[in-house]
Image: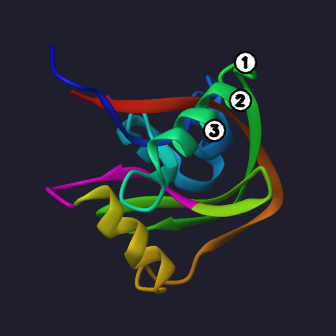
Amino acid sequence: MSKQYILHVGYTLTDKDINSKLEPFIGNKVDDLRSDPSVAFMFYRKQGQSDMKMWYDNKKNKPHVIGYMKQLYVTPKFIVASVVIEGRYEYITLMTSGKAKLLDVKYLANRGELGKPIELSSQIPVEFTPYCEVKE
C-alpha cells in the first residue's frame, strides 16, 4: 500500500447562490464559472504534514465558513475575485479560458496585471467549505 500525503488544504467555494450574487457584475459570464473554485491556505512545500492535517481536522467540523468578496477582476479570459476568509486576503479564480494554470492567474491578479478591479459597493458574503487534497 502506498503512503498518502497531503498536497494542500484550504477552502472550496460552495455558495449555491453565487451566480445570482455575481450576475449584476459579470452578466451572462456566470454561466462560465468553474464548478469548484478553491483557495489553498497551506501547501506541502511550505508546511509539514502534521500542520496541514491539524488545520484540516480543526476546520472540517465547521463545514460552512463565510468569506467576503471585495473586488472582481473581469477580462475576456479570466474572472478572479478577491476574498477575505478568516481575516486572510486571497484571490480565487472563478473562470479561466484556455490552458492557464490557476496559480498563474492568481499571480497575475496579485501583480495588478488583470487591470482595474470592479470594487463591490458592499462586501458579498459567500459560503466556503474546507477541503484537503491528498495524493498517494
Residue contact between numbered discs 2 and 1, judged by CB atoms under 8 Å: yes
Residue 128 location (% of width, % of height): 65, 33
**Residue 28, position as x, y percentages in the image:** 45, 43
Q: Residues within 10 Å of mark 2 (few under 14, many from 20)?
A: few
Which residue position is annotated with label 2? 58
The secondary element bearing badge 3 is classed as helix
Q: CA distance from mark 2 to mark 3?
A: 5 Å
* Residue contact at pointers 2 and 3, CB within 8 angstroms: yes
- According to the picture, the residue beneath numbered tag 3 turns out to be 55
Name the amino acid, label 1: Asn
Q: Which residue is mark 1?
A: 61
Q: Is residue 87 magenta?
A: no
Residue 95 among magenta residues: yes
| Local secondary structure at mark 2 | helix
- Crowding around mark 3 (Cα neighbors within 10 Å: few <14, some 14 to 19, many 20+) is some
Residue 122 relative to residue 104: left or right: right
Tell me where the magenta segment starts and ends, as one range: 91-100
**Residue at the farthest right position:** 122
- Residue 53's spot in the image, x, y percent? 54, 33
Q: Quadrant of the C terminus?
A: top left
Which tag is nearer the camera, tag 1 or tag 3?
3
- Locate residue 63: give its quadrant: top right
